Each structure stands twice: as structure tokens, then as C-alpha cells.
Image: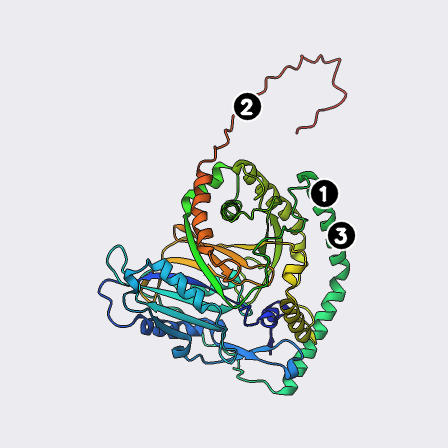
């Protein structure tokens, strides 16, 4: 029995009509010249051929009696007519908007619809009726949905590596016959035995690791306070976030917008300014948020704080589950000078890495689950109904996630993928999620917002381009080479040898 981990199952318990817990992406595809027929049929055939290599698409939930503990995954045969569906835009839509805007509208409308928990937790929407590409070829959009209980960002990338190809001609994938006995349902005795066995294992692990965990937590807390002292009161990440329109109780409505920046140029700018690519992603988000809030007259004097997911996944681990935690980074939005803001972000990410480096080894992704479903579901409902997001202090204002993706052209069922904008989740108190993924020659931004808190999220997406212009105008630090040091040591006589040898620094 493959019972869901505590972290995976939490996304199920938190899900409510106003808080869908699926992630995915908005793709724009260009079909081959002379393409005939409906692309949705091409995609269904392609997915059917790849299903044996994608276990995450061939399983569904099996719930414990009385929802006593975490559910388990069981095998399922997906009906591709239900999981890969076609949406035809009204006639004439192609002449009343560009492809990206038309797709953003569809994603905003489709994202609030929950996935059917009686089926495998994924769905693909093929959007027909988009304007043709610059080369005159037909274009289609695809909006994918994958429940966060099944994958995290890097697991979704691993799944994409199986579904997508490097050439228009789909590659042959070696399918090895599985020796595992398929399980399409579990009886009550097996479920309870598995749940109790998992409970014992989790409790034993906690007891075994407790001394090392306490030592690591104490050392990390000391480092966090030291980093806060060194960086100054306004630069550290250990602080409460200011109140903004993003810190609201979310509704079932969603507003989605996309943006893209050149990847090669961003890498060059990072190298010139001695920063990481992730630093510049945060810088672009910071500049866009500062400009957006200034336009609304609501820019706080205190810096916004971003909740930034960190991966706990070991290199080469492609298991389809969640292995991530969350850290905090101050965005420096209170600083008008972009140079000072970039320095602030670099200091904040350095502080985050120093405090979170040791913690990654002890952060749990699984824990005892008996009784937990009731507690989490009740707490999530109470938090939303009481509008606690508006009443309680928040530790962050926005979620910003940077997921490494393929930096080469990709194809899906013979069609060239032109863009890949991630779509993610918003929760009570964090009504804006900015997820960024490198793809081909671009960094694609996906901005998902609550429709009531930020109905004009498109303006924020446009501000990303203005933030890039601000970054381009930033003077490049001049690195001057120091002249070689000239030795001024006097000759030492044999009779007067030095008493101490200077240590090399």
C-alpha cells in the first residue's frame, strides 16, 4: 500500500472551493505546416503511448475508513476523453485579442474548477480558436492541471521530460514491463494495517532523530539572529510582513497573467552584478510589485516579504511526490534606489541560505497522520470563515517560486511549444503567487491571483517588463585590479632569523 506522505496529503485537506490545490502550466503551441484534423486527438494518442512511463497519471486516491488517516494511491486506467478535453473559443475571438490574452482569460476561468477526486488527479485543456502565429501556422493553447498532492515543481518537470520531445517526431520510449501486482482497491483490514504500520514507523523516526533535530534547530536559530544583526534590522528575513491587499481571505475567483523575459540577457545581467539568476528573478518581482503598489497608492514603508519554496529533493530523485519546504526573503520594496534594492535582495538570500542550509536535512515531508485529516480540514475551514488573514499578522505577502526548466526547444505530439507559463495556487493570506520557470530562451512568469484581491493582475505582469528596463539601466560595478604588492622586506642576516613565520592569508 502506498500511503500519501503527510505533506502530500495536506494539500488534499487544505483544498476548498475557494482554494483549489492544483498546479500546472499554460502552453502556447504552434502546429506543423499543413496540419490536418483536431489536435486534441493527436494529444490523446500521444498521452496514451506515454502512459506506461508516467505512473503519476495512472493512479487515484483510495480513502481510509472515516478519513482516519492519509489516503493511499491505487492504480487506475484514465479515460483520456475525460482527461484531455477540447475548448473552442467563440468564432471571431482570434481577431479580438492576442493568443496570450485569450489563454489568460481561459486559465482564469478554468483554474477554480476542482479536479474530480474519483479519477486520476490531472487534466489537460486544448484551447482552439487562437490567432495564427507570425509564420501563418495554426496555434493552440494547452492548460494543464496536476494536483499538488501528486507532484511538486521539480516532480512536474520530471513528468514533462517524459511527455515532451526534442524534435517534432516523437521519440520511442523504452517501456519495461512491471512485475508489481496492480492494486485497484484496498480492503478495510489492509488499509488499517498499513496506516498503523506507517504510524509506528513515523513515530520511531521522530524519536530517533529528536536529539539531532533539536541541535540543528538551536544552531540555525543562532545563525538567523546573527545574520539579522549583521544585515541590519531592515534587511533580515526574520520579521513580520506589512499588511497589503495580497494578505486577504481568498475567494473562488481567479485572475491569471503571464510575462516573459530573455533568459540569456538575465544570465548576463546576473554575471555583471555578481548575483544569482534567482536573485534577479526576485529583483524583477520586487520592482514590479513596488511599481504596481505605487500606482495604487498602497506601497508600504516596510519591505514586502516573499515566501520562497526550497527543494529538499536529492539530485537524481524523480519520485512524483512533494519534497519542498518554505523560506522567507525580504524583497526590499521600501528602497527606491534599484542598486540598493538589489544589494538588499542579495543580502537577504544569503541570510536565507545560511539559516536554511542546515535545516534542509531535518525538515519533514512525512509525519504521523492518524486524526490529522480532521484537524487540518477543520482548521482550514475555520481560518477561512473567520477571515483570519485580515485579522492576524502575516509572515509573507506573496509566494515567489523559481523552478529550473528545460532551456531547449520542446515539442508535444508534433507541435512546437512556444511558451510555458506556470500556474500555481493561492491560499488565505497569500492571494498572489508568482511562479517562474526557465524554458527555451526565456524566463516565463505565471502570476496567479485571487480575482477579488487583484483583478488587475495583468498590470503587475506588464510591470515585470518595466522592472527589467530598470535592471538594464543599473550601472555595472567596475572591478579594478589591484597592482601586485611590492615586497618591502629587508634582507635578513643569518644571525638574525625571524622568531615567527607570518601566516599566509
The location of residue 164, given as percent across then percent down, is 39, 64
- Which residue is at 40% across, 77% downward? 80
Label 2 sits on a secondary structure element that is loop
Residue placed under numbered mark 3 in the picture: 218
- Would you call the spot at circle 2 few (<14 residues within 10 Å), some (14-19), or many (20 or more)? few
Instruction: Identify the residue at horizontal 60%, vertical 69% (top origin).
Output: 14
| Residue at screen point 55% across, 23% down | 482
- Asked whether the viewer can see residue 165, the reply is no
Left or right, 368 with respect to 404, comes to right
The number of numbered badges drawn on the structure is 3
Q: 225 or 482: which is nearer to us?
A: 225
Q: Which residue is mark 1?
A: 226
Q: As drawn, is 252 to the left or to the right of 94? A: right
User: Which quadrant of the structure image shows residue 416?
Assistant: bottom left
The front one of 130 and 361 is: 130
User: Where is residue 2 shown, x and y percent of the image?
Assistant: 59, 76
Compared to 403, does 75 lie above or below? below
What number is the disc on residue 482? 2
Contact? badges 1 and 3 (CB < 8 Å): no
Is residue 70 depicted above or below 260 in this figure? Answer: below
Quadrant for the C terminus in the image: top right
Q: Residue furthest left?
A: 34
Q: Earlier in the sequence, mark 1 or mark 2?
A: 1
| Circle 1 or circle 3, nearest the eye | 1
Q: CA distance from mark 1 to mark 2?
A: 32 Å
Q: Earlier in the sequence, mark 3 or mark 2?
A: 3
Amino acid at each position: 500500500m502506498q500511503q500519501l506522505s503527510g505533506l502530500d496529503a495536506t494539500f488534499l485537506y487544505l483544498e476548498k472551493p475557494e482554494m483549489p490545490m492544483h498546479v500546472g502550466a499554460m502552453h502556447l503551441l504552434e502546429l506543423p505546416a499543413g496540419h490536418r484534423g483536431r489536435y486534441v486527438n493527436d494529444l490523446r494518442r500521444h498521452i496514451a503511448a506515454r502512459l506506461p512511463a508516467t505512473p503519476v497519471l495512472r493512479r487515484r486516491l483510495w480513502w481510509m475508513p472515516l478519513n482516519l488517516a492519509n489516503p493511499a494511491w491505487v492504480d487506475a486506467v484514465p479515460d483520456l476523453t475525460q482527461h484531455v478535453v477540447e475548448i473552442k473559443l467563440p468564432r471571431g475571438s482570434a481577431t479580438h485579442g492576442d493568443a496570450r490574452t485569450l489563454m489568460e482569460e481561459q486559465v482564469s476561468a478554468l483554474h477554480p474548477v476542482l479536479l474530480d477526486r474519483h479519477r486520476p488527479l490531472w487534466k489537460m485543456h486544448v484551447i482552439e480558436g487562437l490567432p495564427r502565429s507570425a509564420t501563418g501556422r495554426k496555434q493552440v493553447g494547452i492548460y494543464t492541471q496536476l494536483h499538488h498532492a501528486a507532484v511538486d515543481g521539480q516532480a512536474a518537470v520530471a513528468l514533462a521530460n517524459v511527455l515532451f520531445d526534442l524534435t517534432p517526431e516523437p521519440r520511442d520510449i523504452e517501456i519495461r514491463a512491471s512485475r508489481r501486482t496492480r492494486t485497484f482497491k484496498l480492503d478495510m483490514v489492509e488499509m488499517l494495517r498499513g496506516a498503523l504500520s506507517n504510524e509506528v514507523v513515523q513515530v520511531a523516526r521522530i524519536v530517533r532523530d529528536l536529539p539531532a533535530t533539536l541541535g540543528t534547530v538551536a544552531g540555525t536559530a543562532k545563525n538567523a539572529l546573527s545574520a539579522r544583526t549583521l544585515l541590519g534590522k531592515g534587511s533580515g528575513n526574520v520579521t513580520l510582513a506589512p499588511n497589503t491587499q495580497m494578505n486577504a481571505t481568498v475567494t473562488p475567483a481567479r485572475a491569471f497573467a503571464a510575462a516573459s523575459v530573455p533568459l540569456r540577457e538575465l544570465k548576463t545581467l546576473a554575471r555583471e552584478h555578481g548575483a544569482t539568476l534567482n536573485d534577479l528573478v526576485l529583483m524583477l518581482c520586487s520592482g514590479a510589485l513596488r511599481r504596481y503598489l505605487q500606482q495604487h497608492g498602497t506601497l508600504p514603508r516596510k519591505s514586502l516579504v516573499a515566501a520562497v519554496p526550497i527543494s529538499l529533493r536529492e539530485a537524481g530523485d524523480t519520485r512524483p511526490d512533494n519534497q519542498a519546504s518554505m523560506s522567507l526573503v525580504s524583497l526590499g520594496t521600501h528602497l527606491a534606489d534599484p542598486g540598493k534594492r538589489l544589494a538588499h535582495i542579495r543580502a537577504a538570500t544569503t541570510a536565507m541560505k545560511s539559516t536554511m542550509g542546515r535545516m534542509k536535512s531535518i525538515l519533514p515531508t512525512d509525519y504521523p497522520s492518524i486524526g490529522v485529516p480532521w484537524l487540518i480540514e477543520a482548521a482550514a475551514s475555520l481560518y477561512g470563515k473567520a477571515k483570519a488573514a485580515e485579522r492576524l499578522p502575516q509572515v509573507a505577502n506573496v509566494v515567489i517560486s523559481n523552478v529550473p526548466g528545460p532551456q531547449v526547444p520542446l515539442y508535444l505530439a508534433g507541435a512546437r511549444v512556444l511558451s510555458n507559463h506556470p500556474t500555481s495556487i493561492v491560499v488565505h493570506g497569500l492571494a498572489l503567487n508568482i511562479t517562474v520557470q526557465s524554458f527555451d530562451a526565456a524566463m516565463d512568469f505565471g502570476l496567479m491571483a485571487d480575482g477579488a484581491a487583484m483583478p488587475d493582475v495583468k498590470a503587475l505582469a506588464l510591470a515585470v517588463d518595466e522592472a527589467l528596463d530598470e535592471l538594464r539601466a543599473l550601472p555595472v560595478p567596475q572591478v579594478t585590479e589591484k597592482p601586485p604588492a611590492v615586497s618591502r622586506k629587508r634582507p635578513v642576516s643569518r644571525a638574525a632569523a625571524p622568531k615567527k613565520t607570518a601566516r599566509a592569508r
